[in-house]
Amino acid sequence: MDKDLEKIFWDFKLIEPPAGLFDKIILAIKREQELRQTKRLLFGFLFLLVISFIAAPLSWTMLLNQIKSSGISYLVSTAVSDFRTFLTIWQDFSLAILESLPITEIITFSISFGICLFTLRLFLYRKKLLFQYLVNNLKFS
Amino acid sequence: MEETQKNQTKKGDILKLILIGLGVFIISALIFKTGMFIGAMKASFSYRWAEEYHRNFAGPRAGFFGFKPPLPGDFIESHGTFGEIIKIEGNTLIVKGRENIEKIVLLTEKTIIKSGLRDIKISDLKIGDMVVIIGSPNEQGQIEAKLIRVFPPKIIFKGLKFYE
């Protein structure tokens, strides 16, 4: 039995894989990973774009409305027009201005503005990659 | 050699990130602390304003026919107000401002009253004048005015609501 097996394996021809196959496999895996990353990036970018398109104008309008109704513009205008008086009672002036600041709206607008800037930066830094991915996908579809 | 340089750059980046993080944290903590201070001041003034409402506006403590004093949606600003003068009584003004909140403003000898570029007297103030008042709150939920600026509403606040 053992001899038969030996004979079989003696005659067995070892097939060597073609040269560079390993590298090709690794390259293909890397490409696939890159593609997946680009896809994730594209979806992230689109998500952020939609969010910033909705949030930025909305929060800006809210901020403007609050600035109008909080009266902060009148306080600032008084501080500017009566600058000497402002200097003598600056503490009360500053507190009055701070009290009427629409904090929630300022924070909301800052966050949405930050998202807008981040989306723009993402687009500027990765536009080549994103366009390439889109063009390739459109070609194959 | 290259690896040492890379390591140094990495360490520099980490230090930069730590410094930025620390800066952001300190700024956020300062803003938070200021917010707490301002909020506490507004809350305290609002409490006094509501407590003294019946005395200041001559109504019964429990309100007319069980109605409580009109509570504002947010805390009331204590160091300034803007709105329309609805009553003048000696050295006291009642100003109706944002969200129709009426505030009592006390005038002293030191109160500066201005209309345009000129100084005016208390007697020059009229009911219906649009004013911006800067002052400090007292224990009775009133504002002791330090500066009163009279604005011509149709010119200055054209296109804007003076108060809501």
Image (spheres, rainbow, N blue to C red):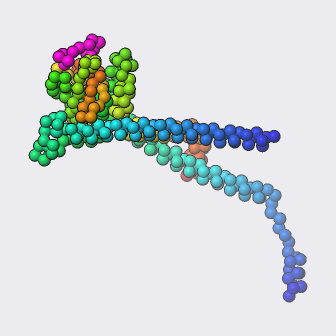
Q: Is residue A85 above or below residue A104?
A: above
**Residue drawn 17% across the image and 16% down it:** B123
Q: Nearer the viewer, residue B97 or A122?
A: B97
B62 left or right of B132 in image: left
Q: Residue furthest bottom?
A: A1
Instruction: State the image quarter where residue B20 is shown.
Output: top right
- Give the answer, above or below, for where B61 lies relative to B126: below
Instruction: Tell me if residue A7 comes above or below residue A63 in the rendering.
Output: below
**Residue B62 vertical position relative to residue A78 in the rendered view, above or below:** below
**Magenta segment range?**
B114-125
The structure residue drawn at horizontal position 38% and vertical position 26%, both measured from the top left corner, is: A91
Name the image quarter holding residue B58: top left
Q: Locate residue B23 relative to residue B7 in the image: left or right.
A: left
* Residue A83 image offset from top left, x and y in percent: 37, 17
| Side (left or right) of A107 relative to A129 | left
Q: Is residue A61 visible?
A: no
Name the outermost residue toward the left.
B65
